[in-house]
């Protein structure tokens, strides 16, 4: 594959990834937002494959497909307006958020032009996959195992937190938050 | 496809994520902002691994750790959303005011 | 330039193979149905009927619903068919005859299977219709349940090959096919294969109890495309099963590609026969069996095949 084609594919993925990333917060439906986020991740997965990290890129897409489906289901379970039949604009501190987002973009985007990174390109992708496998079960075994144990404890913790029969009795009967203003009534 | 170009794209993703995490009221939309930030971080990490780490496999290893972090964040986030909804009937951040000064 | 020509030939070959596979599934399914019910075989009708009904569907008027998500609705069948093509492109016909053989072929195939749930969910969600959304949720439950046993059953085939590449997985089966080496692997894979393209006993998302489930609002060309995409996915699953468990091109007397096609047809026969012989499973039963039986079984399969390789 020549450089021109690789560049064209990269810019297509990059543009797609950033536009769909923006659309996540600019759409009327949370369901659409989840699918836009998935598209953004798929674009990044494609760029990772182009960069030579084939395994990471494909695993990112694999993982995100399941995650976005769960996200869509959670949205319909708890959130208002999942279908997008009405306009949705649920934001707070919007100006601050825009400023913070733009500021962090400018700050981070200027870094690669201010810092000189060493020029040591990685070898061929196929070797990279095999090397990652050796690294996972070789020198970085402890890291890999720790990640596994962290995931296991997350699973247990998530099940305990989300359980209906909570620690202090049935979760639905749990604490109703007191209102801040006296006499304002609860917002149930 | 220079290193600078990839890093700018990663910065754009992180910037959008910061905007989303700060501006959205809904818990799940807020988590989407966090996800986008991690997304950009993974992209920047792999770009640096590919262009200036000489193919050191520990760079990819760090990518695997990032993905673990993402999975942990999602799982615990969904569990907390479920619990908060059960206990407080809240689906947006404004309804949780107990810790507000 | 020859590099691009080769890529074009490979893409065209995968597309042609999928089209032929879809037609074959349509004929084979009717053939098995006739055999099971003991009806006399009318070959000319058997061969012509899929073409006729496809032509009818293609020219039928299309209807729409109130405020659908039109782009997503149009995208879903295309995404499903594209994923089937991605999955099929990984399957080698012979040691040197494969559309593409990435070093991470196993992960690419798994990612394609995982994205199928997005395609089906989009298809059920986008028409803005209650039954279709019901079907989408059923597939969500089904897909999240079969994902883990599927990954584990396929993962066991990677162990003897010591590589994620599909060609290497087939190559490692020269002396002993994985179906013998890991007896639990193929049955697990077939259950999951039926679930992926929601065929026969696991046709819950598009089931007739939901008046057609996710495709209840489809009509005309998009209905045809959706049906074709489902059949294409079934072909891809069967072909990958032949490569990963039945030794791909390995076999006596015949040439490698012939063996691949024969084994694929055999697995397709099993998958399609399940639709005519088995009763439909309820969704909560499938979810329960997946988590309680299939996942431990698949884990055991990985541990045992790993222990044999030590």
Image (cartoon, grey):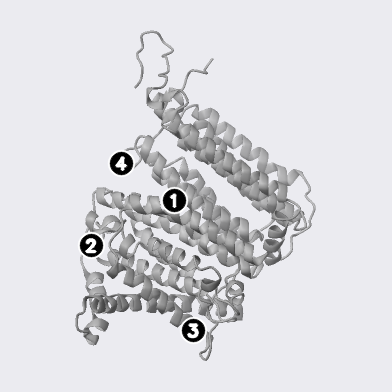
Q: Nearer the viewer, mark 1 or mark 4?
A: 1
Q: Residue at x 37, y 67 (%)?
A: C229
Within 10 Å of disc 4 (Cα), the crowding (few <14, some 14-19, many 20+) is few
Residue ID for mark 3? C259
Query: Which chain's residue wears label 4?
Result: A
- Mark 3 or mark 2: whose residue is earlier in sequence: 2
Q: Residue at x 38, y 42 (%)?
A: A29
| Most foreground residue, A123 or B7 | A123
Vertical position of residue C84 compared to residue A176: above or below? below
Asked whether disc 4 touches disc 3, contact meaning CB atoms under 8 Å apart, the reply is: no
Residue ID for mark 2? C62
Q: Is disc 1 in the same subunit as disc 4? A: no
Quarter holding residue C104:
bottom right
Residue ID for mark 1? C292
Q: Nearer the viewer, mark 3 or mark 2?
A: 3
SS at circle 2: loop
- Mark 1 or mark 3: whose residue is earlier in sequence: 3
Question: Could one spot residue C32 in this view of the protein?
Answer: yes
Label placed on residue A85: 4
SS at circle 4: loop
Query: Which chain's residue wears label 2?
Result: C
Within 10 Å of disc 1 (Cα), the crowding (few <14, some 14-19, many 20+) is few
Query: Which chain's residue wears label 1?
Result: C
The percent coordinates of residue A37 (x first, y second) are 49, 47
The N terminus of chain A: image quadrant: bottom right
SS at circle 3: helix
Q: Nearer the viewer, mark 1 or mark 2?
A: 1
Asked whether disc 4 touches disc 2, contact meaning CB atoms under 8 Å apart, the reply is: no
Q: Is disc 4 in the same subunit as disc 2? A: no
**C-alpha separation, residue under disc 3 versus residue under disc 2:** 42 Å
Q: Is disc 4 in the same subunit as disc 3? A: no
Q: Is residue C51 found left or right of A88 in the rendered image?
A: left
């Amino acid at each position: 594959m020549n450089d021109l084609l690789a560049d064209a594919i990269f810019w297509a993925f990059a543009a797609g990834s950033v536009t769909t990333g923006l659309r996540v917060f600019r759409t009327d439906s949370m369901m659409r937002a989840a699918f836009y986020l998935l598209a953004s991740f798929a674009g990044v997965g494609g760029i990772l494959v182009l960069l030579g990290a084939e395994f990471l890129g494909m695993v990112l897409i694999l993982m995100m497909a399941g995650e976005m489906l769960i996200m869509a289901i959670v949205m319909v379970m708890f959130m208002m307006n999942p279908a997008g039949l009405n306009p949705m604009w649920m934001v707070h501190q919007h100006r601050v958020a825009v400023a913070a987002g733009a500021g962090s973009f400018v700050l981070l985007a200027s870094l690669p032009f201010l810092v000189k990174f060493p020029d040591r390109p990685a070898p061929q992708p196929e070797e990279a996959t095999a090397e990652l496998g050796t690294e996972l079960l070789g020198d970085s075994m402890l890291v890999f195992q720790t990640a596994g144990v962290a995931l296991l404890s997350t699973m247990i913790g998530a099940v305990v937190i989300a359980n209906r029969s909570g620690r202090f009795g049935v979760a639905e009967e749990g604490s109703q938050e007191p209102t801040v203003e006296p006499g304002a009534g609860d917002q149930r | 496809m220079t290193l600078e170009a990839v890093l700018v794209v990663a910065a754009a993703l992180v910037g959008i994520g910061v905007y989303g995490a700060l501006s959205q009221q809904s818990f799940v939309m807020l988590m989407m902002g966090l996800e986008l930030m991690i997304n950009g971080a993974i992209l920047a990490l792999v770009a640096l691994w590919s262009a200036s780490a000489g193919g050191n496999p520990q760079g990819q290893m760090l990518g695997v750790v990032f993905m673990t972090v993402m999975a942990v964040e999602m799982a615990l986030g969904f569990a907390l959303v479920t619990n908060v909804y059960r206990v407080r009937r809240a689906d947006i951040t404004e309804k949780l005011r107990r810790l507000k000064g | 330039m020859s590099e691009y020509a080769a890529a074009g030939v490979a893409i065209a070959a995968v597309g042609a193979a999928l089209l032929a596979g879809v037609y074959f599934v349509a004929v084979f399914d009717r053939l098995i149905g006739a055999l099971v019910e003991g009806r006399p075989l009318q070959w000319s009708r058997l061969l012509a009927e899929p073409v006729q009904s496809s032509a009818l569907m293609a020219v039928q008027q299309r209807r729409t619903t109130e405020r659908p998500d039109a782009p997503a609705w149009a995208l879903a069948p295309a995404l499903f068919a594209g994923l089937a093509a991605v999955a099929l492109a990984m399957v080698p016909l012979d040691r040197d005859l494969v559309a593409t053989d990435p070093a991470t072929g196993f992960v690419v195939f798994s990612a394609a299977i995982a994205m199928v749930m997005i395609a089906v969910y989009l298809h059920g969600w986008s028409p803005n219709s209650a039954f279709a959304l019901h079907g989408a949720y059923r597939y969500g439950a089904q897909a999240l349940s079969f994902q883990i046993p599927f990954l584990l059953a396929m993962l066991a085939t990677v162990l003897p090959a010591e590589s994620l590449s599909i060609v290497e997985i087939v190559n490692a089966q020269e002396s002993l096919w994985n179906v013998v080496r890991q007896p639990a692997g193929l049955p697990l894979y077939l259950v999951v294969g039926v679930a992926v393209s929601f065929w026969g006993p696991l046709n819950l998302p598009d089931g007739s109890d939901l008046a057609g489930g996710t495709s209840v609002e489809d009509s005309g060309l998009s209905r045809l495309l959706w049906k074709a995409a489902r059949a294409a996915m079934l072909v891809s699953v069967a072909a990958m099963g032949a490569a990963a468990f039945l030794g791909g091109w390995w076999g006596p007397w015949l040439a490698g590609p012939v063996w691949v096609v024969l084994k694929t047809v055999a697995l397709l026969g099993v998958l399609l026969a399940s639709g005519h012989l088995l009763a439909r499973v309820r969704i909560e039963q499938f979810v329960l069996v997946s988590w309680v039986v299939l996942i431990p079984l698949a884990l055991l399969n990985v541990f045992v095949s790993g222990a044999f390789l030590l």
